Image: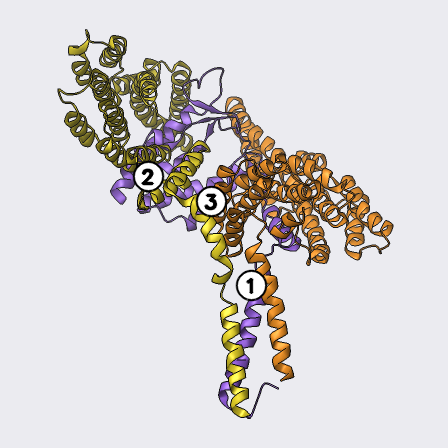
Amino acid sequence: MFILKNESGEIISKLSIICLLLLFHSSQNAHSQTFASDVIAIGKNLSVQTKINLKNETKPKKFWQDNDFSSPTKDLARASISFYQNFISTQDLPVCSFKPSCSRFSVEAFRNANFIVGLLLTSDRLQRDFRFGDSHSQYLFDPKSEKFLDPIADYIDLKGKNEKQN
Amino acid sequence: MKNKINFFNRAIFICLLCLSSPGLAQNDASESLSHYFSSQNLVRFADFLWKRSDYERAISEYQRHLFSAESYNDYYVYYQLGRCHFRLNQPQKSARYFKLASQYANRITLKDTLSAAYSVAIFFTRNNARIANVLDSLATEKNTPYLKNYLISLQALNHLQNKEWKKAASVVEPHNNDIDNKLFFSLRKLAEQGANLSRKSPAWGSFMSVLIPGSGRIYTNHLAEGLYSFFLISGSGWLAYEGFRDSGSSSFKGWMFGAISGFLHAGNIYGSFVSAKTFNQTLEKKILDDVQMHINYRISF
Amino acid sequence: MTFKCILIIAFLFSFLSHYKQLTAEESHPLIVQAEKFYLSENYEACITESLRFLCFEPNHPHVFYARFKAGMASKKLGKMREAEKYFMEAILSPANRDLKMIIRHQLSLSLISQFKFNLAKLELFKLTNNKTQNELASASRLLLGLIYVYENNIPSAIETFSETNVDKLNSGGIESDNISQIIALLNRQIKNPQEKSLKLAQWLSTFAPGSGQIYSGEFLNGLNALALNTTNTYFLWATLREKKVRDATLIFSMLWYRYYQGNRFHAKEAAMNANLTAQKQLFSEIFKEVQQESLQFSNISFSIRLEDLKAE
């Protein structure tokens, strides 16, 4: 029916009419949101769940995925901490009083400062990590994780470092 | 016959094209809508959005008004734009609109209010050089006492925020006998407190830790941390000594605990230095919190 | 000639139905404008025009529709919190009871997206008790059942899904295969729960470090725990053998006891993770069935259109 032996003008006019019809039909129902599509959207939301972690911490970046360490000594430090985090700390009780934990704090210290300062900050942090009475009143307490907040930004000027990098 | 058929085909095609035009359906609707987009109604709607705290939409409506041919009472719209940008934490844009508003304002009291708003927006840009320039340029002899005191208080608060205690005191000192005396009195008191804080010396704290591990922390009022460090370092040092005493210089125990003791001692010295700095910052923070309270009080829009 | 007539008739039919949507003479022009923006996917403009309507016509009977449209546009933009706010305002505005039920349904969807299950359940209870709109009640039961499964409340989930089949039978239909499959899965979960016992995992690790983790399926973790505890025990034994009591006390208190307790703690965590994985597996199986079941509503869009306002 559509392939005609008449003039080509007639074929074009028929095809264009059909296209117009299709356009009208499609535009009417293009934007109706059905219940099925709502269910799919909900399913995507609800299927995202994280594993239970009783220490209330998310998993750290893997050592080989972490590219922010600029020198061999820092790489060695990062590797040692990574070994500790994956093999020793996973068997330990959640005894750290601070958030972030001492190993995470140490990783950030080595990331944002030189090797010596990183080492000194790690040592200092380990000497402050204990709970005895009201010994940490100078730190802010996070009621959600029940730990004291002690971020690396309190010890290293991160803003200045970022501005220099930019 | 063929020509008639062709003509009929073309006629249908043209009619269908015309009928498909959506414009035909909308003429009546657009006439009644234009009433809602008049200048007055644009501002009314923008004010409605402002009250609902929908600042981004309010900005686009105020700007639509400015671009319309009948824009009037511009100073109010510029003022509202400034307030919207301020609420969205955009002090640069906010300052620009407040400046425009003060240029369009006709009454002196209104100009003063708008100049004060402009100075506060500049204050929040945290650009010290620009703040000093703007506050100096706004301070003229023609200022009303309200604006004059406002600018002086902002200058003093800027110095206090930057921990320039003596400069803050010098700004406020000549105006102690003026009106708004209570404010200047409290600012002067804050400046004096800042200048006379009982700070701890980081170098002295480190030196104390070199001599007796943990004493640097006790110096900065962290007793528990100091004692814990002392026991850790002295304990590991004692175990290292025992190892070397029992097995000589090849003792694994001696070297291991010696290294631990050295590591902790170095960390303790550095930690005492940092602890003293943190102690000083904590003292200053109490004053800076009061300064922030005064700054919040100054913002009345 | 016949072909031309058919084309003309078909075109006029589709054009008139489209023209009907465009004009909607009895609706306020701002609402029509908002509707147009919504249909052309310009959702921010749709929200603006809805708010404009609310500003200038606060007492208009179609205020609820403007709020509803703003909520739908916010939902499309992914701003669920704003959508929730608009839907709540729409419910509080005066409107027909049936239309309010549709608004409640959309509100429940926005609440579920924000993980506010308790509030979503309140809305869904009202919808499932609705006798006039059976499809909406069925759809709401599906959502409610899904929430119960997510929260691991299996008995309530079974009850909710069973009610769906009962309603279908009462209205003269047949039981749905998908719902029957869901109920079968849930019953299987109750009779044969694939849960790891937290106490058993901890007791296993008490006697053999690492065995609790292996019981929960975490083999590497279990081997790691075994290796670490064995090393600590060796050091402790070696020190005791040399009769260095003080060193042995230090090793016991600072190393052995800490990592032994850590092993028991992580055995419990491993069991909890295994249970969570099983729960997730059950949820995804049930969700597939719910998705299949929801296709029966593919011709129904639980929304309010301009024509519904004219019909009021």
Q: How many tags in the picture?
A: 3
Within the image, what quadrant is residue B76 found in?
A: top left
Instruction: Specify the chain shown as yellow.
Output: B
Tell me the chain of label 2.
A
Asked whether B216 or C36 is in front, the reply is: C36
Q: Position of residue C241 (x, y in %)?
A: 56, 29
**Which residue is at 15% across, 25% downward?**
B136
Question: Same chain for marks 1 and 2?
Answer: yes
Amino acid at the residue labelled 2: Asn
Is residue A136 shown left or right of residue B64?
A: right
Q: Is residue B118 visible?
A: yes
Q: Residues within 10 Å of mark 1 (few under 14, many from 20)?
A: few
The residue that label 2 is drawn on is A112
- A7 w.r.t. C257: above or below: below
- The kind of secondary structure element at disc 3 is helix
Tell me the chain of label 3.
C
Q: Colour of chain A?
A: purple
Amino acid at the residue labelled 3: Thr
Q: Position of residue C227 (x, y in %)?
A: 57, 41
**Which residue is at 34% across, 32% downward?**
B83
The furthest residue to the top = B177
Within the image, what quadrant is residue C84 found in?
A: top right
Question: Same chain for marks 3 and 2?
Answer: no
Q: Colour of chain C?
A: orange
Q: Is residue C152 visible?
A: no
Q: Label 3, label 2: how many angstroms apart (C-alpha)? A: 46 Å
The residue that label 3 is drawn on is C48
The residue that label 1 is drawn on is A27
